[in-house]
Image (tube, rainbow, N blue to C red):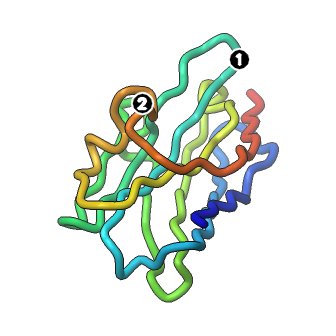
Amino acid sequence: EVQLQASGGGLVQAGGSLRLSCAASGFTFDDDYAIGWFRQAPGQEREGVSCISSSDGSTYYADSVKGRFTISSDNAKNTVYLQMNSLKPEDTAVYYCAAKLGLYYSDYACDAYGNNMGYWGKGTQVTVSS
């Protein structure tokens, strides 16, 4: 059974940093997969923030986070990280980790409001104060 455990959210001031972690089980990072981070703020649609693909190592970032967020993976720990720097109040949302097994590019994984993903973890709240 695939399980995703997200952690690392919290309250931070604008300009600060947080690192989110997504620990995956039920598959290994030696398999084919795409995994990423999505977020949803109250009253807004879910948004693909950043995804990574094992097929070609490609990464995708939403325009709103390019240059500020970095996605990475640790194969030994079966964990994906999202380093978030220069946080803004508009980054406030519940952040979810999601995965899809198989050969999928990162932009496909992050597309369609997350509807292309097959497995979801519980969210972690990120709040950025001004």
Q: Are marks 1 and 2 in contact (CB under 8 Å)?
A: no
The disc placed on residue 122 is none
Classify 105 as above or below 113. Answer: below
Question: Circle 2 is placed at which residue position?
Answer: 64
Residue at point 57%, 50% (across, down): 97
- Disc 1 residue crowd, few under 14, some 14–19, many 20+, Cα 10 Å: few
- Residue 54 pos. (x, y %): 29, 67
Q: Splitting the image into 4 quarters, where does residue 75 fall?
A: bottom left
Distance between the alpha carbons at the discs numbered 1 and 2: 17 Å
Q: Is 127 placed left or right of 73 in the picture?
A: right
The amino acid type, in three-letter code, at marker 2 is Ser
Tell me the SS state at disc 1: loop
Residue at point 77%, 31% (across, down): 129
Q: Is 26 placed left or right of 48 in the picture?
A: right
The amino acid type, in three-letter code, at marker 1 is Pro
Classify 76 as above or below 36. Answer: below
Q: Splitting the image into 4 quarters, where does residue 117 fall?
A: top left
- Residue 15 pos. (x, y %): 63, 42
Mark closer to the chain start, 1 or 2: 1
The disc placed on residue 42 is 1
Classify 78 as above or below 67. Answer: below
Residue most toward the right?
Answer: 11
Tell me the SS state at disc 2: loop
Q: Nearer the viewer, residue 17 or 48?
A: 48
Q: Nearer the viewer, residue 18 or 79?
A: 79
Residue at point 36%, 82% (across, down): 30
Circle 1 or circle 2, nearest the eye: 1
